[in-house]
Image (cartoon, grey):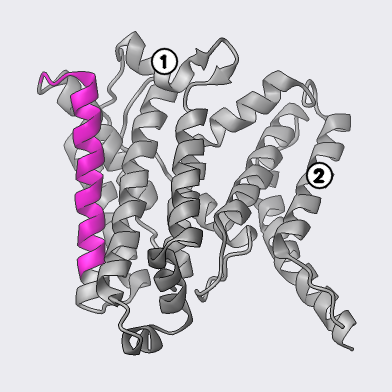
């Protein structure tokens, strides 16, 4: 009998190895304060990765979420400072605008049946170009109200970063959606075979559109939390975040071909990447190593289960 090797177990083992290594070579790595800092700095990528999981499970991809973060951040700052909106109204409008970007992706992919890679590559450039156009590529919005900055810099009870409960709530909502609802089962069925899903009376277009809409709304929320955390809004917000988020999703066991993936696996992927980046910084190692080692983690987490399964079936 073949013993099942779950991908999440491999990723968890890799994360434990990271913690063990950086606890030895990193300065003040193994402290409660640093653990909370890891949670804080992984907030935005974590939100993107969580929302990208259903997209990738459906067999799609969304390369535009990082650029949409930049556009939403600029809109938030511009509406607050230049249009005279309250900061909370500006934040809500920025998130809603991100949703419009997701609707654009959804219509082009789900209704016109265009390739997700090409569509989101195009909107990746479109959204970043709009952000740079609105700011001239140089404008930066700062001096946000203290109550808004608390959302990204404050601590609840003096201990828990203020944005952590938001991420937990979003993760729970997406876990229920993907793993405990008919919508989630439909998304998985679409990932296995869109044609078979249509024959089974699954509303493929609406389910795909929903996945891209939720992905974009998460990007808008991530933009608001990013602005609150760093205290400024500019056009380059979210640069390369889409790549880190996709890496975390695939590292967590979601098949890039669709049909299989878990929210808890994605969270493990985010944790592994955030721990790696934090550990390298505290160990005074070159930051360039983060990309190299993240790639090695991704390849190793994919290759190890295959090796184990081959040994057990031979």
Q: Is residue 126 visible from the viewing direction of this image?
A: no
Q: Is residue 22 left or right of residue 109?
A: right
Could you tell me how many numbered marks the image carries? Answer: 2
Q: Is residue 108 above or below residue 27?
A: below
User: Which structural element holds mark 1?
Assistant: helix
Sequence-wise, the earlier of marks 1 and 2 is: 2
The residues bearing labels 1 and 2 have C-alpha atoms spaced at a distance of: 31 Å
Mark 1 residue crowding within 10 angstroms, few (<14) / some (14–19) / many (20+): some
Q: Is residue 240 above or below residue 203?
A: above
Identify the residue at horizontal 17%, vertical 18% (top origin): 86
The spot of residue 270 in percent (x, y) is 60, 46
User: What is the quadrant of residue 16 in the picture?
Assistant: top right
Say whether residue 97 is magenta.
Answer: yes
Mark 2 residue crowding within 10 angstroms, few (<14) / some (14–19) / many (20+): few
The spot of residue 27 in percent (x, y) is 80, 22
Say whether residue 303 is magenta.
Answer: no
Q: Is residue 235 visible from the viewing direction of this image?
A: yes
Q: Is residue 102 left or right of residue 36?
A: left
Residue denoted by label 2: 16
| Placement of the C terminus among the 4 image quadrants | bottom right
Q: Nearer the viewer, residue 267 or 288?
A: 267
Q: Is residue 201 above or below residue 119?
A: below
What residue range appears in magenta? 84-107
| Placement of the N terminus among the 4 image quadrants | bottom right
The spot of residue 168 in percent (x, y) is 51, 37
Is the stretch drawn in magenta largely helix, strand or loop?
helix
Q: Is residue 104 left or right of residue 119?
A: left
Identify the residue at horizontal 67%, vertical 60% (top origin): 298
The spot of residue 45 in percent (x, y) is 50, 43
Numbered mark located on residue 150 in the image:
1
Identify the residue at horizontal 33%, vertical 53% (top origin): 214
Numbered mark located on residue 310 in the image:
none
């Amino acid at each position: 009998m073949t013993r099942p090797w779950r991908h999440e177990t491999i990723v968890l083992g890799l994360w434990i190895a990271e913690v063990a290594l950086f606890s030895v070579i990193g300065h003040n790595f193994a402290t409660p304060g640093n653990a909370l800092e890891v949670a804080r700095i992984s907030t935005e990528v974590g939100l993107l990765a969580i929302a990208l999981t259903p997209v990738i499970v459906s067999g799609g991809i969304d390369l535009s979420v990082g650029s949409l973060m930049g556009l939403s951040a600029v809109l938030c700052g511009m509406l607050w400072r230049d249009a005279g909106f309250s900061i909370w109204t500006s934040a809500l409008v920025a998130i809603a605008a991100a949703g419009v970007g997701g609707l654009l992706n959804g219509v082009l992919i789900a209704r016109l049946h265009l390739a997700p890679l090409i569509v989101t590559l195009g909107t990746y450039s479109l959204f970043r170009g709009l952000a740079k156009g609105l700011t001239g590529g140089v404008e930066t919005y700062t001096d946000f109200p203290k109550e808004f900055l608390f959302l990204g810099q404050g601590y609840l009870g003096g201990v828990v970063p203020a944005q952590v409960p938001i991420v937990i709530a979003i993760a729970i909502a997406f876990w229920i959606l993907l793993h405990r609802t008919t919508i989630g089962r439909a998304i998985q069925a679409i990932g296995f075979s869109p044609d078979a899903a249509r024959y089974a009376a699954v509303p493929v277009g609406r389910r795909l559109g929903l996945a891209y809409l939720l992905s974009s709304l998460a990007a808008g929320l991530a933009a608001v939390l990013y602005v609150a955390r760093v205290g400024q809004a500019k056009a380059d917000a979210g640069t390369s975040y889409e790549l880190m988020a996709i890496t975390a999703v695939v590292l967590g066991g979601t098949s890039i071909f669709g049909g299989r993936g878990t929210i808890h696996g994605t969270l493990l992927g985010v944790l592994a990447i955030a721990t790696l980046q934090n550990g390298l910084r505290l160990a005074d190692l070159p930051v360039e190593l983060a990309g190299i080692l993240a790639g090695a983690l991704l390849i190793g987490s994919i290759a190890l289960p295959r090796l184990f399964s081959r040994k057990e079936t031979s």
